[in-house]
Each structure stands twice: as C-alpha cells, then as structure tokens.
Amino acid sequence: MYRIASVLMLAALPYSAGANHHILYECVAQNGTKLFTNVPVQPKSCKVLSTGPFEPPVSPAGSPARASPKTAPIATPASFPRVDRETQLKRDNDRRRILDQELGSEQKLLDEARKELAEQESVRLGTERNYQRMLDRLEPYKKKVKVHEDNVANLKRELANVR
C-alpha cells in the first residue's frame, strides 16, 4: 500500500512542480503571422517569451488585484487649459437651461404624438374592417410616440447628470 502511494506521489511530482510555472512561446508562421501559445507548434520557429512562477498581480493593500470594471482616470497634462469655477458653473447652468428647454419642447411633441395616435385609434373603430391594415396604419403613429418617449427619457437622464 505504501509503495503504491509513494509511486503515485512521485508520478505527480513533475505536475505539481510545474503547476505554478507558465511558459509562453511566440511562434512565427511561414507567412509571417505570429502565434502565442503554451505549446510550441514548430520548436524551430518559436522562442520563449516568459517562464517562471505565476504570481497574480498584487494590489497596494497586499491582496491579489482584481480586474476593475472601470478604467483608471487619465491624468490631465499640466499644459491643458483650465477653466475657473465661476466659468464652469455658468456653463453648467447654460447646459441645464438648454436641456430644460429641449425637454419642454420634446414633451409637447410627445403630447401631440399621443393625441394623433388616440385620434387614429378612435377612427379605426368605426371604419377599418381589416385588422392588419389597421395595425399597419397605426404603426407610424406608435413609432412617433416611442421616439418622443425615448427622447424625453434621455433628456431627463442627461439633466440628472448635470452638476
């Protein structure tokens, strides 16, 4: 029993010793394309890029770093023109005012589109006998309402982001 266990342990030793080592090869095909692999396809055309123990990147806190869903902020060059706080506030206020005006006009267009759709739906009850023809006739009115609803939602979202 001990012999079997020791044989199995000796057989597994090369696998466990290489478990944390990664060898990466860069192979160049005859047509010039590059292939990166851990198994060399043609050893003569491949060169070793990295070898050694695999160590995950460590964050400043000492724990392994995790991929961040957000990208790191890019530093602004010193020569980049700056705007003083008062000017930026004025720009933000102008932006808010413009977005408010756009929201008001888009809301009016949405109300008009809904009214037109309601009028067309009331007409269909008395005159239209073919259901598919009625749906085809109402489709542009429904699309117009949908476009204006989307515009209103986007403007509200944009207004929420204004400082």
Image (cartoon, rainbow, N blue to C red):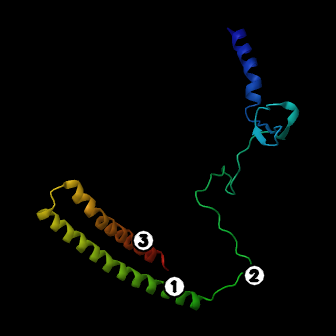
Label ID, residue 92:
1
Callout 1 amino acid = Asp
Residue 47 in the image, given as x and y percentages of width and height: 86, 38
Q: Which residue is mark 3?
A: 154
Of marks 3 and 1, which one's residue comes earlier in the chain? 1
Q: Residues within 10 Å of mark 1 (few under 14, many from 20)?
A: some
Q: Is residue 137 above or below residue 64?
A: below
Report the mark closest to the observer, 2 or 3. Answer: 3
Spatial CA distance of label 1 from label 2 is 23 Å
- Residue drawn at x 38%, y 70% is 153
Which element is circle 1 on?
A: helix
> Label 3, label 1: how many angstroms apart (C-alpha)?
18 Å
Amino acid found under the numbered disc labelled 2: Ser
Question: Decide: marks 2, 3 in contact (CB < 8 A)?
Answer: no
Depicted 25 relative to depicted 116: above or below: above
Could you classify mark 2 by the number of other residues whose Cα lies within 10 Å: few (under 14), some (14-19), or many (20 or more)? few
**At 79% across and 43% down in the image, what residue appears?**
33
Q: Which residue is mark 2?
A: 79
**Image location (x, y in percent) of residue 141:** 29, 67
Q: Position of residue 28 (x, y in %)?
A: 82, 40
Task: Name the front one of labels 3 and 1.
Answer: 3
